[in-house]
Amino acid sequence: MDHFFYRDGELFAEDVPVTELAKQYGTPCYVYSRATLERHYTAYTKAMGEHPHLICYAVKANSNLAVLNVLAKLGAGFDIVSVGELERVLAAGGDPAKVVFSGVAKQEAEIARALEVGIHCFNVESEFELERIQKVAAQMDQQAAISLRINPDVDAKTHPYISTGLKENKFGISFDDAISVFQKAAQLPNLEILGVDCHIGSQLTEIDPFLDAMDRLLFLVDELAKLGIKLKHLDLGGGLGVRYQQEIPPEPDTYAKAVMEKIQGRNLTLVFEPGRSIAANAGILVTQVDMLKDNGHKHFAIVDAAMNDLIRPSLYNAWQDIIQVKPRTDGLQANFDIVGPVCETGDFLGKGRELNLKPGDLLAVRSAGAYGFVMSSNYNSRNRAAEVMVDKGQHHLIRARETFSQQIANEYLLPN
Ligand code: LLP
């Protein structure tokens, strides 16, 4: 559930009319709801109840400092994949002791910075990386807490681009090598083994693949215990899906309960790395209809947001709901392709949408809070959109719209 709804015939973000936001901040503009972010995060913590847990929000989903700060204030941990994300967490007041560091190839400088600030754990993805962390930790005379990311080879039944737990994917240590890599880690003097983790994919709409992966990890936990390697935590990654269209993904509550049932009687802290399920439905992308075009075959609504602002439809053929900020009946009723001004056929936000429109109307692309702004670019030399956070009746600019001079700030002409 989110806090974007119609009241008196127009769309509100919490207690603020979206038209007011568009007027003040311009379009295209990302609008986030603080109450929704908080609700989604606490759905996880409530579901875990008394069981020892750490909910590490996946920063990659939406890394705006204000978003991170809202979650940090609730006591969230963070899942990061780069030193840039680590610096963001720190700048937003996040607790480094609750940070897990994922990613297939962490650089030495990134490892050193993470050790310096005292992160919770590195999620290690290969033997090579294990040695690299050992080397940096030894140089710094520190102990590095690690978990091994295992590729459990289960089918997450999601889009191939966001499926990560199959043999053919680049992620993690293969299940067959897991025990020997753990044994190796146990021998490296500057490493402390904390746990085991996996992340099998994103936008999962069923629980079973998670539970299959968990079975495989628990098997490892038991085998390792026999060898004297005792794990303290089990990290199931992120991946819980959200409702974009007709999907009915399990609620965090249902998911967490199923996981806890399996883990009963074991002394294992549970770690989750949710991104999308916290941020996606906490954001919309507000855009204005610039012109309507009919080429005799198709109706197009050309809007001022484009694939550079929200690439999910173009990249994954993802479907996101597009709704009218002020629904009307006196415009042109048609089946529209909602397209941007970028020079690419693939530049669309949605296709075949039945709407009643006039130029100047405002539209909201729903479920845009995760993998929206963070994946935006300057393609076609377009400035990046503004980001705004609504908090009950108040609204705050949390990222100013980029200016042209900012866009070219790091570019230089040749001397002659
Ligand atoms: N942990 C790890 C190690 C990950 O790689 C990811 C996402 C997450 C956690 C968070 O997963 P989530 O809860 O958000 O599903 N750009 C794509 C999604 C890519 C996800 C990559 N990894 C999209 O727009 O659908």
Image (cartoon, rainbow, N blue to C red):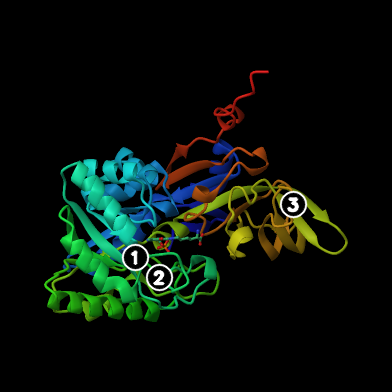
Q: Earlier in the sequence, mark 2 or mark 1?
A: 2
Q: Which residue in the protein does label 1 denote?
A: 237
Residue 71: give x, y in percent of width and height.
32, 50
Q: Mark 2 and mark 1 in contact? Answer it, CB < 8 Å.
A: yes
**Mark-to-mark CA distance, 2 and 3:** 44 Å
In the image, what residue occupies the spot 53% across and 70% down? 160
How many numbered marks does the figure carry?
A: 3
In the image, what residue occupies the spot 60% across and 60% down? 315
Residue 9: give x, y in percent of width and height.
58, 56
Label drawn at residue 200: 2
On the rendered image, what quadrant is the C terminus found in? Answer: top right
Report which quarter residue 149 is drawn in. bottom left
Q: Earlier in the sequence, mark 1 or mark 3?
A: 1
**Element type where label 1 sits in the image:** loop
Q: Mark 1 and mark 3 in contact? Answer it, CB < 8 Å.
A: no
Q: Relative to residue 340, is residue 246 depicted above or below?
A: below
In the image, what residue occupies the spot 46% across and 50% down? 32
Q: Which residue in the protein does label 3 denote?
A: 358
Report which quarter residue 196 is drawn in. bottom left
Residue type at mark 3: give it: Lys
**Mark-to-mark CA distance, 1 and 3:** 44 Å
Residue type at mark 2: give it: Ile
Residue 407: give x, y in percent of width and height.
58, 32
Other-residue count near label 1 (Cα within 10 Å), few / some / many at <14 / 14–19 / ≥20? many
Q: Relative to residue 161, is residue 293 depicted above or below?
A: above
Q: Is residue 270 visible?
A: no
**Element type where label 3 sits in the image:** loop
